Image: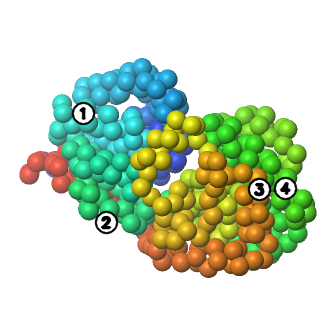
Amino acid sequence: MAETSRPLDVFVIAGEESGDQLGAQLMDALSKLTPGGARFRGVGGPRMATRGLASRFPMSEIALFGITSIIAHIPTILRRVRETVEALNANPPDVLVLIDCPGFNRRVGRAIRKIRPDIPTVFYVSPTVWAWRPRRAKEMRAYVDHLLALLPFEPAIHARLGGPPTTYVGHPISERIADIRPNAAEQARRTAAPPRVLVLPGSRRLEIQRLSPLFAGTLAKVQDMLGPMDLVLPAVPHLRGLIDQTIADWPVKPRVVDTEAEKFEAFRTARAALACSGTVTLELAVAGIPQVVAYRTGWLEAQIARRLITAETAVLANLVLGESVVPEFLQEYGSVETVAPALAAVIADTPERRSQLDAFARLDAIMAFDGEDPSLRAAKVVLETIEARRPAGAGRAAA
């Protein structure tokens, strides 16, 4: 008698806004590729909820940033780790997918591997072993069966460092190229006056608060240098209130938008950007928007980072391109006097602006944007990992 298909049981954990996006797209792809469909449980955000995930607890409880914030929430983190491991042990899934959030997911992965080594485990998004704490690569091999990388240089790095088997599946930006690149009319807006400039102070509360004085002063000085600008600040919806409060005293105020459609429209028409370091720098580069990057963290975090970080740049676009084409101003090196002239240079028609545009034109080839969607590639690797870990002759039991 033929085996009756049942839904694939996927336990997935995402701990940040970007992880929620990756998780939702992966859920769609797994549901599409699995004959019996898939059911999902675990931890996620609003996008994953729309695909049927009932999060075991709010994703925000593990979406922590900065050493002091993590230390303050250690009891909550450890309790949630324990609860998650207990749930996995009581009802083992067909596969465990850990999406980013390495601080939390590393603890879950290591703990469950000790008591349930039969659960296939896939880690989605490589920790930044190429920037700091390279030993994490080898440590992951003990509890991760396969690592899904977003950046093209990461598989070679994990191979060199003794990490788990790693596949470059592509960056989710490739699924949004049409949303962020301009048509002819939008390209014309990029060259029109007043210049539209994106203001991107980060997607975390502490980032926004720490960068606010620098961004406010920089934009005011650039306006003095170049004249009026059309400033647009795409906000994460749940931080809209904080952003409105933060910019209330800025001498030059950006227009705040908080929908995805408004963000994409701003990307397609912007001439330049002032951005916080992070994934957005690569998104801007793919969109063809010259940029200046600034970043500030707490004093303690900065002292630790200076001793541990091995990468020559904190700008993701620079790392992928293999050259420091985007200027970055970190910690005390970021001041109005240093950042404002750099931003003015990429707004005006200058060699600095043209250099960035020339470099960004190479990204399609570097990141292999002409292939399958990353979520589909990732889903295929997840399914292959399940098969590779399944005992010979075994199949998923009928429901």
The circle drawn on residue 112 is: 1
Q: Nearer the viewer, mark 2 or mark 3?
A: 3
Name the N-terminal-most of marks 2 and 4: 2
- Residues at marks 4 and 1, CA–CA distance in whole angstroms: 53 Å
Dot 4 and dot 1 residues touching (CB under 8 Å)? no
Q: Earlier in the sequence, mark 3 or mark 1?
A: 1
Circles 2, 4 touching at the beta carbon (< 8 Å):
no
Task: Assign a secondary structure to mark 4.
Answer: helix
Q: Is residue 186 above or below residue 343?
A: below
* Nearer mark to the viewer, of 2 and 4: 4
**Mark 3 element type:** helix
Labelled pair 2, 3 in contact (Cβ < 8 Å) = no
Residue highlighted by disc 4: 221
Q: Amino acid at mark 2?
A: Ala
Q: Residues within 10 Å of mark 3 (few under 14, many from 20)?
A: few
Mark closer to the chain start, 2 or 3? 2
Question: In this picture, is 394 found above or below 288?
Answer: above
Marks 4 and 1: which is nearer the front?
4
At label 1, the amino acid type is: Ile
Distance from disc 2 to disc 3, alpha carbons, whole Å, reads 40 Å
Residue at mark 2: 156
Closer to the camera in the image, 81 or 380: 81
Spatial distance from mark 2 to mark 1, Cα to Cα?
27 Å
Report the residue at 80% width, 72% height from top.
348
Q: Position of residue 341 (x, y in %)?
A: 77, 63
Of residues 117 and 102, the one nearer the viewer is 102
